[in-house]
Image (spheres, grey):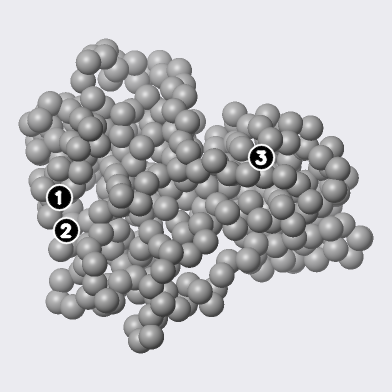
């Protein structure tokens, strides 16, 4: 395929997965400057792609305009106006398959991600577990473009490029000498969330050590928890509910480090080139979802024959009485952060 072709890219959710796609498309755009990309995803995720050249973002509205098969056909008709030469299905779900089928019937070339379902099942099963690192999800994304005949070699490096600090956040960055740590302590699935009392111990120790802490990610419940932490600990700031996604990405890009669960916070930090110390429970970095360019050595997780037992973190831990994530001591997390910032 000639590098001047137009490619429609499909990935609708989840937030972390879409952020990983953005990391891949950043490098794709750099290596294929004449190619045109049409990224199809949920409107909320558009800020992930705003800095990628030669990319047009096309929103999918799965609950309204594009609901059901009639809605998907309408989306197909919208996308057909771009006159694409190929479809890169990076999602492989019912919606993306339906849209791909519409295009295939008109002779458009389709390539779809190989999610490695059998390998992931082997990694997470309780008996005869095959415990080995699987192909990184970002490489699975990249494989789709390679199968379309395009060159793409991922660097697997984070490139820190601080963005302009939003006006209403400038007051948080007046001290240029203090190390700034983002904390993303929540996740979509409760089993991926580190014990909140222990997380508060981590925050207390980092605060007393003189770091500035910025808490990200969540809704009203998480916002209330963060506000409580802010009242109790110096140099700690709650960003939940106070900034939009574009502003959050800009703020994260100016941090020295992010502490995150296996969640979107890790992938957002990776997208803007910030190193991450990540905490893992029933999921595992071997499944391929480690943040782009992040180091396996910065993953905090316990060794246990039952880990991992979940790919997405929607299943409880099988490690025994205590959840495996709760066996991680706050001191372990604090020491890793200090080592990373001072090393």
Q: Which residue is mark 3?
A: 28
- For residue 283, above or below residue 269: below
* Residue that sits furthest to the bottom in the current view: 127
Q: Are marks 3 and 1 in contact (CB under 8 Å)?
A: no
Q: CA distance from mark 2 to mark 3?
A: 38 Å
Q: Sequence-wise, which precedes: disc 2 or disc 3?
A: 3
Q: Is residue 73 visible?
A: no
47 sits to left or right of 92: left
At 34% from the left and 83% from the top, the residue drawn is: 126
- Residue at the spot of label 1: 332
Q: Is residue 313 left or right of residue 319?
A: right
> Mark number for residue 328?
2
Is 124 situated above or below 262?
A: below
Q: Is 49 drawn above or below residue 322 in the view shown? A: above
Q: Position of residue 110 (x, y in %)?
A: 79, 60
Left or right: 327, with 216 as reference point = left
Q: Work out whether residue 51 or residue 41 is closer to the camera in this orientation and state it.
A: 51
Q: Few, some or many C-alpha atoms within 10 Å of disc 3 (few <14, some 14-19, many ≥20)?
A: many
What residue is shown at x 15% (from left), y 63% (from top)?
A: 327
Between the residue at mark 3 and the residue at mark 1, the CA separation in whole angstroms equals 37 Å
Of callouts 3 and 1, the N-terminal one:
3
Residues under numbered marks 2 and 3 in contact, where contact means CB atoms less than 8 Å apart: no
Q: Position of residue 219 (x, y in %)?
A: 35, 47
* Quarter occupied by the C terminus: top left
Disc on res. 135: none
Q: Secondary structure at mark 2?
A: loop
Residue 340, percent from left and from top:
25, 37
Calculate the distance from the C-alpha at mark 2 to the C-alpha at mark 1: 7 Å
Mark 2 and mark 1 in contact? Answer it, CB < 8 Å: yes
Q: Residue at x 44, y 40 (%)?
A: 270
Residue at the far right in the pictured view: 106
Q: Position of residue 212 (x, y in %)?
A: 20, 27
């Amino acid at each position: 395929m000639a590098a001047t072709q137009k490619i429609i890219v499909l990935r609708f959710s989840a937030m972390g997965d879409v952020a990983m796609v953005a990391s891949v498309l950043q490098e794709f755009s750099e290596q294929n400057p004449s190619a045109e990309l049409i990224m199809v995803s949920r409107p909320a995720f558009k800020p992930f792609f705003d800095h990628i050249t030669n990319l047009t973002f096309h929103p999918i509205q799965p609950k309204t305009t594009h609901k059901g098969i009639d809605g998907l056909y309408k989306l197909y008709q919208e996308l057909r106006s771009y006159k694409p030469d190929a479809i890169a299905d990076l999602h492989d779900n019912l919606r993306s398959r339906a849209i791909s089928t519409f295009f295939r019937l008109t002779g458009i070339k389709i390539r779809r991600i190989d999610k490695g379902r059998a390998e992931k099942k082997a990694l997470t099963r309780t008996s005869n577990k095959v415990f080995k690192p699987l192909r990184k999800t970002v490489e699975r994304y990249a494989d789709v473009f390679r199968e379309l005949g395009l060159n793409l070699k991922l660097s697997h490096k984070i490139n820190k490029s601080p963005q302009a600090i939003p006006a209403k956040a400038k007051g948080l960055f007046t001290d240029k000498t203090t190390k700034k740590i983002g904390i993303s302590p929540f996740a979509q699935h409760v089993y991926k969330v580190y014990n909140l009392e222990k997380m508060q111990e981590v925050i207390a120790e980092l605060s007393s050590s003189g770091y500035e802490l910025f808490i990200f990610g969540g809704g009203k419940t998480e916002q209330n928890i963060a506000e409580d932490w802010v009242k109790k600990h110096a140099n700690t700031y709650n960003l939940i509910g106070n900034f939009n996604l574009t502003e959050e990405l800009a703020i994260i890009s100016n941090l020295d480090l992010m502490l995150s669960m296996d969640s979107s916070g890790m992938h957002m930090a990776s997208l803007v080139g910030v190193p991450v110390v990540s905490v893992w429970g029933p999921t595992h970095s071997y499944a391929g979802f480690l943040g782009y360019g992040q180091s396996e050595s910065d993953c905090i997780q316990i060794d246990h024959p039952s880990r991992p037992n979940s790919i997405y973190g929607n299943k409880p831990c099988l490690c025994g009485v205590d959840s495996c994530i709760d066996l991680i001591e706050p001191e372990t997390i604090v020491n890793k952060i200090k080592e990373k910032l001072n090393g």
